[in-house]
């Protein structure tokens, strides 16, 4: 006796358009198109390959830090000290430049100092079980404070010949692509693949969704978090190298306030501050949305402080709108 | 006896020891004039740390307080410049209302849309600060632009004591009564201690959150008018970054960022500690460039010490359980 099955168990959920259309990355892509359209409409100089590639200088360094920051926020941690790490790392490069180091050793010094700062944050958070937001508010003052003690009101402005190549130069003549931007794209690809395709990457989501369950599943939560803090510090060191190389000077207030811009990139990118959700693709889209919105506004001579109002509104509206819509619908 | 073993007593001893140590190096520091000047200087931090503590108690955070202060300060300055005849209490009332309004915006987004407080206040931090530029058209207002009564107000004394100290006393007393002796205040502790349990106890969490952010905004507003009239200048960058000093005062004072833990005395002592450090450095001939590094180190030390004392084992009430636990340990 054969009876037709009462229901069929599917291997995966049935395809629904709403799954794609309501995805955060899709909304961000629409937002990016809107920014590009509005930018083209308000300024004739906006849609030009040279203008656009020039604009990448202004966000590539921040965007490079946004990538590891996204992973950190995915695990429910945060690092507010990244901009301070830049100042310390830039200081180290400046001092070593004075001792006669060449460009390549300087880059390594900057990156190593960044990684050490990240290691310090990670140790405090994982070994002593302290909340990362408080620890990194503390190290934020400490790192920048050290830079301030050493530099006072002075600046380091002498760097060896060739040091500015990476920060100011172009990898490709056509289409014009700066080294820093190319580096960001490459890193974004690597981070994206790491997060979505490797077992270690999936563990990051597991930690963010439920750290206790992750621990009991055999994931070494503390070690992973420590690695991510080191990675964030390392990337901040890399960004410090790019920035110092681009502007050719080190002051105590270098990269001041960047931590908030970087976190804005990550949150707008759809990474939940309570951990466990978000993608690198979203962060990359958010980087472009913020970068090109800033470009469009500055092309029509909007002052920087007003641009930051717009960005702040964008952040809150982008987060609040889906919540409001979900409630109404 | 219980007080002597409390965290507040330990912190008070540390502050006292620090002040005496500085006094040994430079006796002038312990003079009445010097201590009094320090008290006046730290008044703003006292008030703002208490407001911040009320928010942190509910597991929240408000990064926008300093921007709120600067914006309401500018509103008050513009108002006082436009209507020089208006008496000072009315100007203060106006800025309290404006500040509370800005705080309620934060509170509404946190309480009714469930957006994480750090995201909301990160956004409003940028928005409020930028609004200063917008409403003032980028102008600076100096004491010459403001009315004489407005500028003279923070120099007035009552019973021989500086008016700012009176305000700090008033706010401290109000917060003490509110947090310790009102049902709403106790509910804030309950919400931070265990939101789910608080909800089952019938506490209307959103309404309490709205209130506490509004309250913090009102305190920021009050401080805004006082700040601008005291320093005689209103422009975009006043109190920039002060939010971190405020949070640092709370952390040093033993307010747990995880919510539900903190006292008025603790927050006041935390603020006093920072006040002593800031005022002591120039007296003992340490370059002010050290200030940032020292406060960073202090924050880290405080959070490490506080985390230790928070890790007390849960209370075992049943005698049998206590016996078993004793047997194991």
Image (cartoon, rainbow, N blue to C red):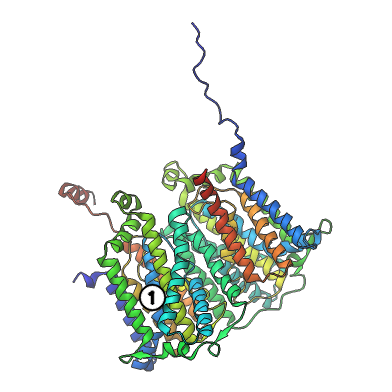
- Give whichever of A43, A51 is nearer the camera: A43
Residue A136: x and y in percent read: 49, 65
The answer to whether A128 is drawn above or below residue B165 in the figure is above
Q: For residue B188, what is the image quadrant? A: bottom left
The quadrant in which residue A309 appears is bottom right
Work out whether residue A204 can be spotted: yes
Q: Position of residue B145 (x, y in %)?
A: 55, 88
On the image, the x and y values in percent for residue B269 come to 34, 76
Quadrant containing the N terminus of chain B in the rendered view: bottom left
Q: Nearer the viewer, residue A227 or B114?
A: B114
* Marker count (numbered): 1
For residue B141, what is the image quadrant? bottom right
Parent chain of label 1: B
Residue farthest toward the top in the current orientation of the protein = A1
Q: Residue furthest right?
A: A174
In the visual, does B29 lie left or right of B135?
left
Q: Name the residue under label 1.
A: B47
In the rendered image, residue B304, in percent from the top left (x then y), is placed at 39, 66
Q: Tell me the crowding category of disc 1: few under 14, some 14 to 19, or many 20 or more residues within 10 angstroms, Cα based.
A: many
């Amino acid at each position: 006796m054969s009876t037709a099955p009462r229901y069929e168990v599917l291997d995966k959920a049935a395809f629904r358009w709403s799954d794609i259309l309501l995805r955060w990355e899709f909304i961000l892509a629409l937002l990016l198109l809107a920014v590009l359209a509005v930018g083209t409409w308000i300024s004739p100089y906006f849609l030009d390959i040279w203008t656009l590639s020039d604009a990448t200088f202004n966000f590539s360094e921040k965007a490079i830090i946004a990538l590891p920051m996204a992973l950190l926020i995915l695990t429910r941690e945060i690092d507010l000290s990244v901009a301070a790490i830049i100042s310390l790392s830039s200081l180290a490069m400046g001092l070593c430049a004075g001792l006669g180091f060449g460009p390549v050793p300087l880059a390594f010094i900057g990156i190593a100092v960044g990684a050490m700062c990240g290691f310090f944050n990670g140790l405090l958070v994982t070994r002593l079980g302290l909340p990362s937001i408080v620890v990194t508010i503390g190290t934020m003052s400490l790192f920048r404070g050290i830079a301030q003690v050493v530099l006072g009101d002075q600046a380091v402005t002498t760097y060896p010949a060739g040091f500015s190549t990476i920060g100011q130069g172009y990898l490709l003549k056509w289409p014009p692509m700066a080294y820093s931007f190319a580096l960001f794209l490459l890193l974004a690809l690597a981070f994206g693949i790491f997060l979505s395709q490797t077992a270690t990457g999936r563990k990051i989501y597991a930690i963010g969704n439920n750290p206790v369950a992750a621990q009991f599943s055999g994931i070494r939560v503390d070690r992973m978090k420590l690695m991510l803090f080191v990675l964030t510090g390392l990337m901040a060191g890399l960004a410090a190298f790019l920035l110092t190389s681009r502007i050719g000077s080190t002051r105590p207030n270098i990269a001041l306030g960047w931590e908030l811009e970087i976190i804005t990139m990550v949150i707008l990118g759809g990474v939940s501050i309570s951990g466990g959700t978000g993608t690198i693709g979203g962060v990359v889209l958010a980087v472009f949305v913020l970068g090109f919105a800033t470009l469009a506004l500055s092309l029509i001579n909007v002052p920087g402080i007003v641009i930051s109002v717009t960005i702040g509104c964008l952040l809150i509206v982008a987060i609040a709108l889906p919540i409001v819509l979900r409630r109404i619908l | 006896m219980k007080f002597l073993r409390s965290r507040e007593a330990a912190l008070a001893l540390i502050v006292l020891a620090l002040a005496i140590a500085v006094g040994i190096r430079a006796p002038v520091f312990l003079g009445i004039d010097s201590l009094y000047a320090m008290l006046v200087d730290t008044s703003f931090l006292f008030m703002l740390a208490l407001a911040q503590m009320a928010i942190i108690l509910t597991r929240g955070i408000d990064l926008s307080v300093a921007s709120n202060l600067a914006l309401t300060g500018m509103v008050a300055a513009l108002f006082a410049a436009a209507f020089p005849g208006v008496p000072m209490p009315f100007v203060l009332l106006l800025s309290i209302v404006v500040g509370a309004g800005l705080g309620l915006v934060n509170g509404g987004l946190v309480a009714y849309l469930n957006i994480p407080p750090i995201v909301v206040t990160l956004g409003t931090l940028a928005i409020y600060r930028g609004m200063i530029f917008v409403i003032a058209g980028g102008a600076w207002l100096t004491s010459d632009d403001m009315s004489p009564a407005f500028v003279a107000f923070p120099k007035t004394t009552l019973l021989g004591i500086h008016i700012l100290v009176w305000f700090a006393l008033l706010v401290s007393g109000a917060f003490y009564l509110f947090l310790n002796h009102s049902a709403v205040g106790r509910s804030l502790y309950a919400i931070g201690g265990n939101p789910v349990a608080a909800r089952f106890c019938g506490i209307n969490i959103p309404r309490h959150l709205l209130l506490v952010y509004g309250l913090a905004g009102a305190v920021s507003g009050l401080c805004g008018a006082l700040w601008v009239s005291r320093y005689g200048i209103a422009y975009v960058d006043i109190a920039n970054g002060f939010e971190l000093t405020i949070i640092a005062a709370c952390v040093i004072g033993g307010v747990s960022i995880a919510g539900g833990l903190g006292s008025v005395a603790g927050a006041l002592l935390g603020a006093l500690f920072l006040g002593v450090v800031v005022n002591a450095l120039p007296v003992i001939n340490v370059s002010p460039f050290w200030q940032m590094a020292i406060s960073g180190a202090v924050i880290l030390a405080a959070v490490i010490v506080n985390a230790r004392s928070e890790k007390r084992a849960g209370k075992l009430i049943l005698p049998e359980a206590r016996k078993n636990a004793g047997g194991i340990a």
